[in-house]
Amino acid sequence: MTSPRNHALGILETRGMTALVAAVDAMLKTVDVRVLGSHGVGSGWLTVVIEGVVSDVEAAIRVGRSEAVNHGDLITADVIAGPVPGALKSMPHRTDAVTTGPFGAGAMGILETRGMVPLIRGADAMVKSARVRVAGWTSVGGALVHLVVRGELSSVQTALQAGKACADEVGEVYAALMIPRPEAGVEPLLPGPPVSNGPRADAGALGVLETTGYASAVGGSDAMVKAADIDLVRLVIASGGRVDALVKGRLDAVQAAVDAGVDGALEAGELNASCVVSRPSSEVMACFGRSEAVRATSGNQAMGLIETRSTVALVKAVDQMLKSADVEFEGRYKVGYFLTASVVRGDVGAVGAALQVGAEEAERYGELVSAHLIPHPFPALEERLIH
Amino acid sequence: MSAAIGMIEVEGVAGIILASDAACKAAGVDLLGWESIGGFTTVFFGGSISRVATALRSGEQAAKEVADHVVAAPMTHPEPVCREYVSNAVASRRRTPSGALGMIETRGYGAHVTANDKMMKAADVQVYNVLTVHNRVVCSLILGDVASVTEALPVGRASVEAGENFLGAALITRPLPDVLRAFGPGAP
C-alpha cells in the first residue's frame, strides 16, 4: 500500500473511548489508512496510531481531530512523514489485529459516563426502551466507563436517547455516539461481549454503591449485607480510584441495603454515588449482576483496613501495625489512581490498636484515606473480597 | 533480609529511576525493585542502616531533578511482609544492555511516538522502554552512547516541551545494570 518514500504515521490521542471510536471510524471511512494499534495510559487518555501515504494520513488526522473534539477531548494529533523504519516496534501500541470492511450488522451506540452509577442506569434504560443488545462495557481510566449497544439504526437511536436522559438524572454523561454502519477497524478498540454462560441472574432490583477507595467499598458492603437479605454480587473497579459494590435481591431489601451502605461507606471513607435499579433488564444483569471472585472466608476474626494515597505511608503503617499488635497481614489491594490498601486480621482489640498505630504512622508520610475496623465480617462479605 | 530498607516515592517514574541510580551509586545498597499505584511510584532498596540512610539522601536529591514532591523513608528491621509491596522486583537473570540512558516524561502517550521517532532520526539511539505508570504519565527511555543520547535528548525534549503536558527530561551517563534491568522491557 505504501512505499517508504511517502509513508507516514498518524497519531491521535483523545480522552474517552467515544471520541477515539468516532475519530477512527471517520478516518477509515474517509481515506485508505490502516490502524496499527492503540494504547491507553490511564485517566481515559487513549492513543491510536495509523499508517498510510502522507496525504491520506494527513487527511485522516484532520478528520479524526474534528471528530475527537466533537465527542470528547483531543489531547494530541500529529503526522510523522517518513518514520524511522521498524524503529517503533518496541512501542506498546502495536497490535496485530488488522480488520477491514463493516463491523457486524446494524448500527452501534456508545454511552460513556463518569462512574458506573449513570452507566448502569443508562444501560437499563437503553435495553428497556428499544430492541438493542449490549455488546460489552469497560473502563478506560479516570472513572470513564462506556457501554456499547448494537441494533437497528432506529432502535439504537431511541435507546441512546433514553439512556442518555436516564444517566443524566443520576450522574454525568461524558459522551454518547451513534454510528449507523461502524467500520471493522474500530472493533479491536471495543470491549468484548459480557460473559453469557451460567444461570440467568434475574432479580427484583440491582443496587450500586460507588465509593472512592477499597476500604469504603468494603465498609459499605459490610453494612449492606448486615442491613437486609440481599446478595452481594461483587466488587468492581471503575478506575479513577472508584470501587463499585453491586447487590441484588428484592426491591425493598436492596433499597434498605443501599441506604445502610451509604452510611457504612461514609463511615469508612469516601462515597461517590449510589442507585437502585428496579426490575433490571436481563441484559444489565448479565453485565453487572453475576457473582464473581468467590473467596474462602477466614474464620471469625476482626478485619482491619488501612488505605492511603502513598506506598511509603502504607508500608510504614503496615510495618508498625505488625510490630505493635498481635495482628496478621492478610493482603493488599491496589485500587489505582494513587490509592493503595492493606488488610490485617486479629481479635477486635488487637486490630483496633493496630489501626490506631497504623493511622498515625501513615499520616507522617502521606495521605491517610481510611483506617477502618470491621469487628465481625459476615461470610457474605468475606467471599466477595478482592484483596 | 537487609537490616534496613529505604523507600523513595515520587509522582511519575523518571524521579525514581534517577533516585535508584544515585542511591545505589552513593551507598552500595541493593536495588530491590519498585511499585506503582497509579500515579505515584516507589523504589525500594536494602542494606545496612547507615548505608540506607546515605542512599536515601542521595536518592532524594536526585529525584528532585524531575519531581516536585518526593517522599523518602527508612525502615529498620522491616517486617518480611514489606517485601510484598515490591511489585517489580529486579530480575537478576535478565540480559543487561549498556549505554547512556535518556528519559523523557510527559502526560499522554501520543507525543512519545513523535518524540522517539525524532530522537532516533537525530542520533544513533534506540527506544529501550516506554513506561506507563497510569494516571496518564508516560516515560520514554532511550539508550545509546553518551554522545548520541546527549544529542538526541534535547531533540525529544523540544518535541514535547510545548504545552502543559511536559513533565521532565534527564540523562544518566552510566546507569547501573540493575537500574536498567528494573526499568527495562518486561516492567509495566
Image (tube, rainbow, N blue to C red):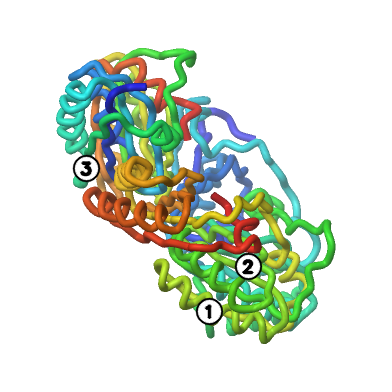
Task: Name the chain under label 2.
Answer: A
| Lateral position of residue B3 relative to residue A102, left or right | left
Q: Is residue A157 visible?
A: no
Q: Against A262, is B46 above or below?
A: above
Q: Residue at x 51, y 34 (%)?
A: A6
- Element carrying mark 1: helix
Snapshot quadrant of residue A320:
top left
Q: Residue at x 49, y 75 (%)?
A: A273
Label 1 to label 3: alpha-carbon separation: 40 Å
Residue A79 got which mark? none
Crowding at label 2, few (<14), some or many (≥20) Cα neighbours within 10 Å?
many
Task: Name the chain under label 3.
Answer: B
- Element carrying mark 3: loop
Label 2 to label 1: alpha-carbon separation: 33 Å
Snapshot quadrant of residue A99:
top right
Image coordinates for residue A317, horizontal then vertical, percent:
32, 47
| Lateral position of residue A107 relative to residue B131, left or right | right
Q: Is residue A350 visible?
A: yes
Q: Against A342, is A371 above or below?
A: below
Q: Residue at x 53, y 75 (%)?
A: A261
Residue at mark 3: B70
Q: Residue at x 61, y 57 (%)?
A: A382
| Lateral position of residue B41 relative to residue A62, left or right | left
In the rendered structure, which amino acid carries the disc numbered 3?
Val
Residue A110 got which mark? 2
Image coordinates for residue A152, horizontal then vertical, percent:
79, 73
Q: Nearer the viewer, mark 1 or mark 3?
A: 1
Badge 1 and badge 3 both on one subunit: no
Q: Against A226, is B180 above or below?
A: above
| Lateral position of residue A346 relative to residue A112, left or right | left
Residue at mark 1: A260
Label 3 to label 2: alpha-carbon separation: 41 Å
